[in-house]
Image (spheres, rainbow, N blue to C red):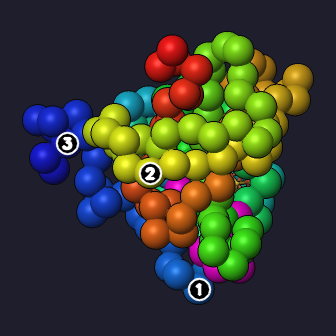
Amino acid sequence: MDYLETGILEIDDIAVPPEERLVKGPVAVIECVQNIPCNPCVDACPKGAITIQGSINNVPKIDFEKCNGCSICIANCPGLAIFLVDKSFEKNRATVGMPYEFTPLPQPGEKVILLNRAGEACGEGEVIKVRNAKAQDRTPIVFMAMDPELTMEVRFFRRRTNER
Ligand code: SF4
Ligand code: SF4
């Protein structure tokens, strides 16, 4: 529970999909730990993979086997607390999809600096796709390719254009 003091989640604070599920294809990772009255993620999921037991103030739980990686929940989360991890992307690269509400949007092929939950640089990534459908209501999802070892660490990125 150190995050109550630091504001930064540790890996032990979240439910991590098992490796067998991660290598099968994209799966959502929910990093929502605060007891607040919120549940759009539950209503948004077409597979019924996300549930909140009892009070709406409880945190959501995800059934990784029910999740098909559609990414719909990501844009529906007002807390920007859901990510999509895919270790089936390439032999030596995996992807993380993350909500990104800044403009201009990055473009596929752009190289970026990967940031961990503390905002520290932890590697280099490549934008492979930006999903920005009207139904996402101005919460685009940027998909980033990276070293598979970084997928449970990287949660944001810095653009090299910001360094000029
Ligand atoms: S990625 Fe799709 S299937 Fe998985 S939890 Fe989110 S909305 Fe449900
Ligand atoms: S929509 Fe986001 S912030 Fe709200 S309960 Fe779901 S994961 Fe948490």
The secondary structure type at the circle numbered 2 is: strand
Q: Residue at x 40, y 55 (%)?
A: 153
Q: Residue at x 76, y 47 (%)?
A: 128
Q: CA distance from mark 1 to mark 3?
A: 28 Å
Q: Hey, which quadrant is residue 37 in on the image?
A: top left
The magenta stretch spans which residues?
A: 22-29
Q: Residue at x 13, y 47 (%)?
A: 2
Residue type at mark 3 is: Tyr
The answer to whether residue 50 is left or right of residue 18 is right
Residue type at mark 1 is: Glu
Q: CA distance from mark 1 to mark 2?
A: 24 Å
Q: Is residue 66 above or below residue 137?
A: below
Nearer mark to the viewer, of 3 and 2? 2
Instruction: Check disc 1 and report the residue beneath it.
Output: 20
- The answer as to whether callout 1 falls within 8 Å of ligand 1 is no
Instruction: Check disc 3 and report the residue beneath it.
Output: 3
Q: Is residue 39 magenta?
A: no
Q: Residues within 10 Å of mark 1 (few under 14, many from 20)?
A: few
Residue 32 seen by the camera:
no
Image spot of residue 53 (x, y percent):
46, 54
Image spot of residue 131 (x, y percent):
81, 37
Q: Residue at x 26, y 53 (%)?
A: 10
Image spot of residue 67 (x, y percent):
70, 65
Q: Of the numbered discs in the image, which one, if any, rests on residue 123?
A: 2
Q: 70 or 104, which lies in front?
A: 104
Q: 122 or 48, which lies in front?
A: 122
Q: 55 or 58, which lies in front?
A: 58
Q: Residues within 10 Å of mark 2 (few under 14, many from 20)?
A: some
Image spot of residue 127 (x, y percent):
70, 43
